[in-house]
Amino acid sequence: MRRILSAFLLLSCVSVCLAQSQYVDLFMGQQGGSNCVIGPQLPHGSVNPSPQTRDGGHDGYKPGEPVRGFGQLHVSGTGWGRYGQILLSPQRGFNAEEDGHDSDITDEVATPYYYKCLLRRYNILCEVAPHHHSAAYRFTYQSLDGADEPTLLLDVAHSLSQHIVPEQHGEFLGGNIHYDFRNQMLCGYGTYKGGFGSAEPYKIYFAISSPHFNLQQAAIGAGQGNISRLFAQIKPITSDDKAKDLYVAVSLNSESNACQYLREECLGKGFGTLRDNAREAWNTALDKIQIQGTDEEKQLFYTSLYFSMVMPRDRSNDNPRFGGENIDDHYCIWDTWRTCYPLLTLIDEPFVSKTIRSFLLRYQNDGKCTPTFTSSLEWDWRQGGDDVENVIADAFVKGVGGFDRDEAYRWMKWSALNNRSKEYQLLGWQPEVDTLMLCSNAMEYAYNDFCVSEVAKMMGDKAFAKKMLRRSKSWQKLFNTSLKDSDADIYGFIQPRRENGQWCGDKQGGAFSPSKVYASWVEYFYEGNSWTYSLFTPHDFKSLIRLSGGKKKMVERLCYGFDHEHIALWNEPGFLSPFIFHHCDRPDLTSQYVGRLRQKNFSLDGGFCDNEDSGAMGSWYVFTGIGLFPNAGQDYYYLLPPAYSDITLRLSSGGTLHITREDTGSAVKAIYLNGKKLNGNTIKHSQIKNGGELHYK
């Protein structure tokens, strides 16, 4: 696959041979549990047209399986799937059954801006290029002896959650297909339920235009009661083997929006122009960071950077409930606040500002900012605390503009007083009752409180800042200094406790184990163990180190935890763990373990160490590669030797940060900013936001 990809890029990118998009390997996102979408898209585009296969999993596609068709909407890197609707399936003859038109493929090419494959069953060459709300398709029905006439299936009933991953309990609730004579487009909608996110039904509207297919005479078919099936058979105007273009736009708001998107984005441009424009959009986005390295190093780096820029979706002015800016499909803020949004603050600050304005617009309309939006609907399930506050706090302390700071603080203050559980506000922890994720929620609430205290201080609300700072220490009430791991001479872990203060054992009646890993939405910890969550005190490492027995003991704990895989990188709460070595005066160990984690958990053949999580994993790899790592919500970065000898960042401020590494030994001897030696191993955002020269010796 990669040989095909490289050959194609050599031919098609001669004029932009230095463009970074040529290094993005979308097949990496298909490996392991990465769950990344293989199809092309624009940065934060609303649509993500992509092939789907029978057992495609939650991203819809599995390499080596027959392709069923091309859906227009997907979520990338998530643990569970959603969308997959408005399926297009080019055929010879016609079969509208869900599994009646699968075809093996060959000659597959996947880039950020273009996808192609040959359907071997029908000898049809399929090409796809994206715009923001729309996609351009080019189907070439090549000669095939004894073949039936060329056709195209439009399947409106199809969805990932019903037909590819039925464990997501998807349903098709009906819809409509009709020809719009005024716009000369084939239009309609489907209503759906199911998938990862809001359980409420939602509609997806579409509009299709083509100079090569007879849309006006599309034969519309439906299942019993117009519920089980809804499809159209579309025939090309001519049956020759010339390329036939078709354009489709999607809206979550209205049919008129879909028609407008199609007119503005596609009509009059042509497939080649749209493909080239998408390529340039990605070259511009990825060119914000340039590295020197081998081809494999660049593939890993730019693939990770690419996945940092696809989710969430910008669906401004396409919300079915209210107008205005709408950054949608956050899967999930619990993942992305830690590394993805801090990375965007460096290289795409306007998107961060727009996200915060989107949060505040929802607050104005709904009285709350929920952590995850799906199909422009609210979804109140949380994986952790109130982490929208962390995104806003990170923007505050780093001087991000473009949003109403007074309104943002009013919401943060309201959230701190209303969104935390009553038990947490009263006791400082959530006792062992019916509430889920008792310990992990409390740990996240504590950091949310610290983030609110920082913003309150900046806004001059000193009394509330002091109150929140005091409450941010509540995590210490769950830290049992006497609790020992059964297989290590290490004391002090987060442990659940009852309302009367008594420490809890395991739910099964045994002793509590710090190394036990919990699943999703369960009793004590969300997708992790006490080993990992006991280290999640981004604002209070000094207290954590003291309670753990001092710096030497903390170093022993960290080394043992990483060496025995008790501290996980496969999920986001462990992201900051190796940087605790910095607080123990051992930045050399930070570098050592980060290097191990990068090598073990990220590879072209193995993918990401788990779900890529909407840019969270990718941005962790990017930050550790460039020699900076954020403590998100606070105005500093940890410094560590970059993975590449020469790095250039084009910053949101318009400045350029040039990072170089001089290899003269096995350890960092000195770090220089603009020729001046730095004291310590951290740096403030204000010191680099306008650019400069950062040199590691």
Image (cartoon, rainbow, N blue to C red):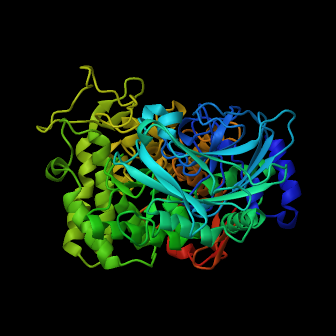
Residue 204: x and y in percent read: 47, 54
Placement of 1 over or under 366, stated as above or below: above
Q: Residue at x 68, y 67 (%)?
A: 281
Of 50 and 621, nearer the camera is 50
Tally the numbered discs: 0
Which quadrant holds the N terminus? top right
Above or below, 32 against 633 in this view is: above
Depth check: give the residue in front, 65 or 532. 65
Q: Residue furthest front?
A: 217
- Left or right of residue 552, residue 679 in this image: right
Indicate the quadrant where residue 633 lies.
bottom left
Using the rendered view, name the quadrant where residue 291 is placed.
Answer: bottom right
Percent position (x, y) of residue 402? Answer: 44, 79
Residue 298 on image: x %, y %: 74, 53
123 vs 658, left or right, is right
Residue 660 appearing in the image: no
In this orientation, which residue lies closer to the viewer: 477 or 44?
Answer: 44
Give the quarter of the image for residue 512: top left
292 sits to left or right of 485: right
Residue sitting at 69 percent across and 33 percent down?
66
Which quarter of the rendered picture does the C terminus lie within?
Answer: bottom right
**Residue 527 can be seen, yes or no:** yes
Q: Report x, y in % for residue 65.
A: 68, 31
**Vertical arrangement, residue 510 with respect to residue 97, above or below:** above
484 lies left or right of 596? left
Q: Nearer the viewer, residue 58 or 611?
A: 58
Q: Residue at x 54, y 35 (%)?
A: 164
Q: Residue furthest left?
A: 500
